């Protein structure tokens, strides 16, 4: 191959470790979405004559609604049997399992409460009040129209966080923009022996033999071993037995790395400044970077909605931004699902996956809102 037409992605999901605290890219991007969104909402609310304190209250509603909605959405939409059998696992958010459709429903419900009720709670006395009290100048649709602007931005950052985590990857592709997600393999090698100091993974321009399918692409793993008295025989045994087994026997690795079974591992072992360095030649499975598809298109939706608000501001017809958001975001989500792997096995047995089924009512709701906005505009014309 004279031109490398794919990308190898093996970034560490952890950004930094401070004592027992681990800062992950996903968490940083998730939190950044809310912080940046809050600043944008401050400007929007000021421009339309509302208090900044309302944004602070709204932020609390949004954070709680997003986390609870996304988690419960995954629990009930994707794996209800698993979590109902072990309810305590619902709290283990750090193990993964958030659904954007659940977040959407949760946010809409939270904004209904924000715009229609006065909710106060005293945590020191464990007492609260809940009374119907519409918020002046902030109807449900008015609030949601402004919120979807920043929800789109936050969604774009979260999907980029999924890319940093090497999760929610797409189906295999032979296109020129496939990505080989090699983090699982890299982490498995690093975790399997204290002798391994570092692992790097890169694309290669070497020719693919005729015995290897065109769907695979050449990938090079470079392992540097610690200079701590490890013998060459030990290292060769580790490569030929352990690494070969990792590549061929573990499904989480095999879905991304193709190592021919029944053959010897193709590697070269050399010494560099007293330490052994192994260069392994194998093959990767390029996949659609579905996370980037969603992140990029969602960011474009953010720019579109912000532009419309900037032009119309307080004259923005109620329901317009929400309608556009629902139709475009979940319309694209419906399409994106064709490029993604199903999250749970039961989706393989149904004509549309769960993400597509859940998108349909939201798209229809958006169409309904846009029709209503159009009718109101015709009446006032």
Image (cartoon, rainbow, N blue to C red):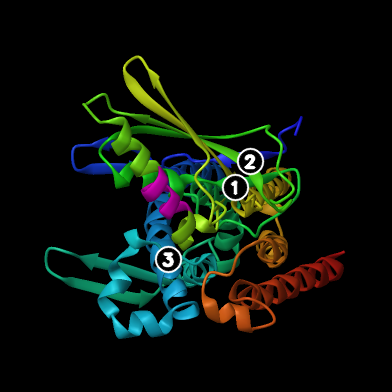
Residue 380 visible, this angle: yes
On residue 284, the disc is 1
The crowd level at tag 3 (other Cα within 10 Å; few <14, some 14-19, many 20+) is: some
Above or below residue 229? Residue 179 is below
Q: Is residue 138 left or right of residue 16?
A: right
Question: Disc 1 and disc 2: Cα gap in Å?
Answer: 6 Å
Q: Is residue 13 magenta?
A: no
Q: Observer-nearest residue: 30 or 341? A: 341
Outermost residue, left direction?
125
Q: Residue at x 68, y 78 (%)?
A: 352
N-terminal of the pair, mark 2 or mark 3, is: 3
Residue 362 screen position, x and y as percent: 65, 73
Q: Evaluate whether residue 52 shows in this view.
A: no
Main structural element of the magenta stretch: helix, strand or loop? helix
Contact between labelled residues 2 and 1, with CB atoms less than 8 Å apart: yes
Quarter of the C terminus within the rendering: bottom right
Residue 190, position in %: x, y?
A: 34, 41
Query: Which badge, 1 or 3, is on the more N-terminal residue?
Result: 3
Question: Which residue: 63% across, 62% down?
Answer: 340
Mark 1 in CB contact with mark 3 (< 8 angstroms): no
Q: Nearer the viewer, mark 1 or mark 3?
A: 1
* Residue 245 belongs to magenta span: yes
Query: In the drawing, does residue 243 fall left or right of residue 313?
Result: left
Q: Kindly identify which residue carries mark 2.
A: 218
Q: CA distance from mark 2 to mark 3?
A: 32 Å
Q: Vertically, is 213 above or below 272?
A: below
Q: CA distance from mark 1 to mark 3?
A: 26 Å
Task: Give the image location of residue 53, x and y in percent.
Answer: 39, 49
**Magenta stretch in the rendered image:** 240-247
User: Cβ–Cβ below 8 Å for labels 2 and 3?
Assistant: no
Per the image, label 2 sits on a secondary structure element best described as strand
């Amino acid at each position: 191959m004279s031109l490398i037409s794919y990308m190898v992605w093996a970034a560490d999901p952890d950004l930094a470790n401070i004592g027992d605290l681990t800062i992950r890219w996903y968490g940083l991007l998730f939190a950044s979405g809310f912080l940046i969104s809050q600043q944008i909402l401050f400007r929007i609310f000021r421009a339309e004559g509302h208090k900044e304190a309302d944004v602070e209250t709204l932020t609390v509603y949004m954070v709680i609604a997003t986390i609870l909605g996304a988690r419960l959405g995954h629990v009930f939409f994707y794996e209800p049997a698993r979590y109902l059998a072990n309810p305590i696992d619902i709290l283990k958010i750090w193990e993964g399992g958030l659904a954007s459709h659940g977040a959407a429903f949760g946010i809409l419900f939270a904004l209904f409460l924000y715009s229609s009720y006065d909710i106060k709670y005293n945590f020191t006395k464990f007492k609260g009040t809940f009374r119907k009290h519409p918020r002046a100048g902030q109807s449900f649709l008015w609030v949601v129209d402004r919120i979807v602007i920043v929800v789109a931005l936050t969604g774009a950052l979260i999907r980029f966080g999924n890319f940093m985590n090497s999760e929610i990857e797409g189906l295999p592709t032979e296109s020129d923009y496939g990505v080989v997600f090699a983090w699982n393999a890299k982490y498995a090698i690093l975790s399997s022996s204290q002798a391994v100091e570092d692992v790097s993974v890169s694309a290669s321009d070497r020719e693919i033999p005729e015995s290897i399918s065109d769907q695979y692409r050449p990938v090079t793993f470079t392992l540097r071993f610690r200079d701590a008295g490890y013998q060459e025989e030990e290292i060769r045994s580790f490569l030929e037995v352990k690494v070969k087994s990792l590549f061929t026997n573990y499904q989480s690795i095999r879905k991304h790395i193709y190592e021919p079974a029944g053959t010897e591992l193709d590697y070269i072992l050399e010494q560099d400044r007293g330490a052994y360095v192994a260069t392994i030649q194998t093959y990767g499975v390029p996949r659609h970077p579905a996370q980037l598809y969603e992140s990029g298109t969602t960011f474009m939706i953010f720019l579109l909605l912000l532009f419309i608000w900037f032009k119309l501001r307080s004259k923005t017809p109620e329901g317009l931004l929400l309608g556009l958001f629902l139709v475009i975001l979940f319309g694209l989500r419906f399409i994106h699902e064709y490029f993604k792997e199903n999250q749970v096995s039961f989706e393989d047995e149904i004509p549309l996956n769960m993400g597509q089924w859940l998108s349909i009512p939201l798209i229809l709701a958006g169409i309904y809102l846009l029709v209503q906005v159009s009718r109101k505009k015709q009446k006032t014309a």
